[in-house]
Image (cartoon, rainbow, N blue to C red):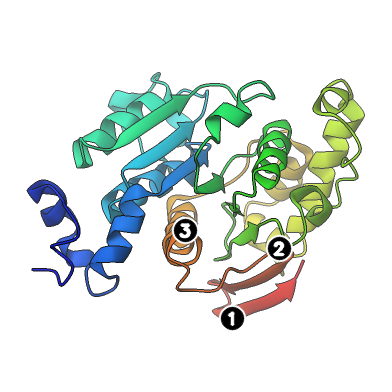
Amino acid sequence: MFNNKKSITWKKSYRDHISRNIGLISALEQEKLRNASVAIFGMGGLGGPLAEQLVRAGFEHLIICDNDKFESTNLNRQICSLNDLGKFKIEAIEELLLKINPDTKIQKYYEIDEKNISEILHNVSIVALTLDDVIASLIISRESRKKEIPMIETWGIPYLWAWWFTSDNADFETCYNLKTQNLTIGEIKRSDLYSKEIRKAIINKLLKFKDLKEKYDREKGYFDRMIEGSIPLISIAPIVRLNASYLAFEIIFSGVLKIKEMIKAPNIIGYDYFSMKPINKSL
């Protein structure tokens, strides 16, 4: 069936699984996807659908990290059903992924800290940052850069975009103007001021997206409450699923196969799908 079938050994189940991929990618490229290891931090509205799409695309090595359990407020956008409420997200999602491809090798981590991050990222090809925990994000981004592992990030906001952090562009902390490069994680943890300033800096960066407040404030006052932290981040299924799909596309075609050029922070090339206008700017 495939031109390179003599040099690639796949089980029939895997060959059937990925047969519709071939053409968009070659059989040898599919083998690269099968062998690549992706670490996804956060199994919420972005990370859960991303993990599902990577397994459907034929990835067989995933690391998934999260310590939250599914609750009813997740039903509007995350990969869960009523039967999953109360379960740890990584356990419910692992169960789903193994139903898609039982040969997928999944490592689960409930906690991320300075002691285990090196172990988590051992032999990892790509890191996907899909969580809103600022301390964990700093730990992950620092270790990814140290190990020269490309890290991709997006947010579940109504703009189709993602950016990469590699060893040859702006690091995570510089990009967000965090002013934490000379601080240890312990020093940041011990200071409520630093945590608040980090949150503020990240929000200020996201506010550079045109008309962000207007998009989130159709129920007046909700945007300000979200920014203050008095209500959780606002989101809806189509927005997070679109961005999760874009993450999967970038990981496949930019991160692993290198068919497409990476869009590296602080640059953004994306799309505002409310105004139906392209985005091409530096944040």
Q: Quadrant of residue 206?
A: bottom right
Q: Amino acid at mark 2?
A: Ala
Residue at screen point 43% across, 57% down:
248
- Tell me residue 64's x, y (percent): 45, 34
Label 3 crowd (10 A; few <14 / some 14-19 / many >=20):
many
- What secondary structure is found at the residue carrying circle 1? strand
Kindly identify which residue carries mark 3. 251
Q: Earlier in the sequence, mark 1 or mark 3?
A: 3
Query: Alpha carbon of mark 1 to alpha carbon of mark 3: how far?
Result: 24 Å
- Tell me residue 49's x, y (percent): 39, 47
Query: Alpha carbon of mark 1 to alpha carbon of mark 2: how far?
Result: 20 Å
In this rendering, position of residue 203 left or right of residue 183: left
- Tell me residue 137's x, y (percent): 68, 38
Q: Earlier in the sequence, mark 2 or mark 3?
A: 3
Label 1 crowd (10 A; few <14 / some 14-19 / many >=20):
few
Question: Quick check: 57 above or below 83?
Answer: below
- What secondary structure is found at the residue carrying circle 2? loop
Q: Earlier in the sequence, mark 1 or mark 2?
A: 2
Question: Quick check: 165 above or below 93?
Answer: below
CB under 8 Å between discs 2 and 3: no
Q: Amino acid at mark 1?
A: Lys
Foreground: disc 1 or disc 3? 3
- What secondary structure is found at the residue carrying circle 3? helix
Point out which mark residue 265 bears: 2
Kindly identify which residue carries mark 1. 277
Question: Quick check: 8 above or below 268?
Answer: above
Do we see residue 95 in this rendering? yes
Query: Alpha carbon of mark 2 to alpha carbon of mark 3: how far?
Result: 15 Å
Q: Quadrant of the N terminus?
A: bottom left
Q: Amino acid at mark 3?
A: Ile
CB under 8 Å between discs 1 and 2: no
In this rendering, position of residue 54 left or right of residue 74: left
